[in-house]
Image: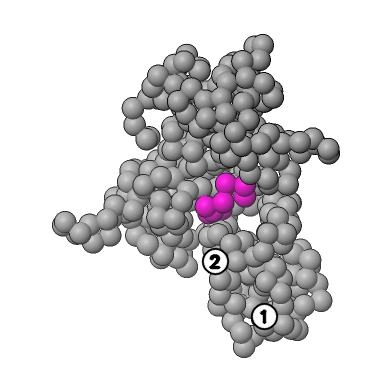
Amino acid sequence: MTAAVQLEGVECVFGSGATAVRAVAGVDLTIDAGEFFTLLGPSGSGKTTCLRMIGGFTLPSAGRILIGGQDVTRLPPYARPVNTVFQDYALFPHMSVRDNVAYPLMVRKLPRAERERRADELLALVQLPAAGTRRPSELSGGQRQRVALARALVAEPQVLLLDEPLGALDLKLREQMQSELKALQRRLGITFLFITHDQHEALSMSDRIGVFNAGRLEQVGTPREVYDTPATRFVAHFVGAANVLEGDTARALTGHAAAMLRPERITLSGAAAAGGARASGTVAEVQYFGAFTRVKVAAAGALLQADLPARPGAAAPEPGQAVSLHWDDRAVHALRAGSEG
């Protein structure tokens, strides 16, 4: 099967000489047809630059970009079989919702009746069947996001590029749209390339995730692989909360030179040096998050986090209390020692 998107040694350098900035550095990546693939990373990591190169808005300094097996490295955006949904939606305020959705078909000079028919089909698909005659200003943020999706999909792209499209929505609506986006992608079978800095979005929606850091891909894998077995210290820190241990502390607690231990995989008992304890220490801080309570314990020369699930009537440990920490050997994941990557 031909891959939907391939990046071969792709680089992007802005500027020249001493002021040059390498935004993307030698990225190799294959995205399968029909996959929901997410590029995850902090601001400035290179993920959006990568998306812009795939979309044709930024030209790479080196390497090749292939879409559906075709080399599109130097093609302009309109000549690529992709469409993009931006965070600000970029809807035309003077046009009706139906005309916004049909705009790509108007550019292709399709007859008006055909444009409107297909626009109405897409509006129904994104659950806005009665919004065609309204203006974008009359819609909520979530509805405008759906209109932008419909407009991007009406031209039937091979790949849909989504540049942090949920970033402007409130938490509840963002979670709702995450479910709707994934369901829509499964229904259509189109390849989605999603850009986000939100680890929860990436973990909940993606078939696979590529974690970006400083212009490079640190790891590519399924959400479970990236979370349970991070390839680098950066991935361990960035994707979820983590106790990352090194040196003497790591060796004493895990037997490895460097290791990761997720907070939810640690349990506490309310007495120091309890039977079977891996470590004992003193509670330094307690943070309540509703679904769980995060307890920070000074132990073995480190500050270890443990996430305790909410239990009705259960009292959380108090700062200054002596506690013991317990975990299973399988909860420990060894990391490469010595460098952040």
Residue 220 horizontal/vertical position (percent): 50, 37
Name of the residue lying farthest toward the right: 312
Q: Label 1 crowding class (10 Å Cα cut-off): few <14, some 14-19, many 20+?
A: many
Quarter of the image for residue 97 reads bottom right
Residue found farthest to the top: 275
In the image, taking residue 68 as reference, residue 312 lies left or right, namely right
Residue 85 vertical placement versus 321 (above, below): below
Residue 292 vs residue 77, the one in the foreground: 292
Above or below: residue 47 compared with residue 133: above
Q: Which residue is mark 1?
A: 136
Amino acid type at image mark 1: Pro
Image-quadrant location for residue 261: top right
Element class at badge 1: helix
The stretch drawn in magenta includes residue 196:
yes
Q: Which residue position holds label 2?
A: 86
Residue drawn at 83 percent across, 39 percent down: 312
Q: Earlier in the sequence, mark 2 or mark 1?
A: 2
| Quarter of the image where the C terminus is located | top left
Q: Residue at x 49, y 38 (%)?
A: 237
Where residue 196 sits: x, y (%)?
A: 54, 53
In the rendered image, residue 10, in percent from the top left (x then y), is placed at 35, 47
The x, y position of residue 232, in whole percent, is 43, 32
Total residue callouts: 2
**Magenta residue span:** 194-201
**Residue type highlighted by circle 2:** Phe
User: Is 310 above or below relative to 60?
Assistant: above
Q: Are marks 2 and 1 in contact (CB under 8 Å)?
A: no
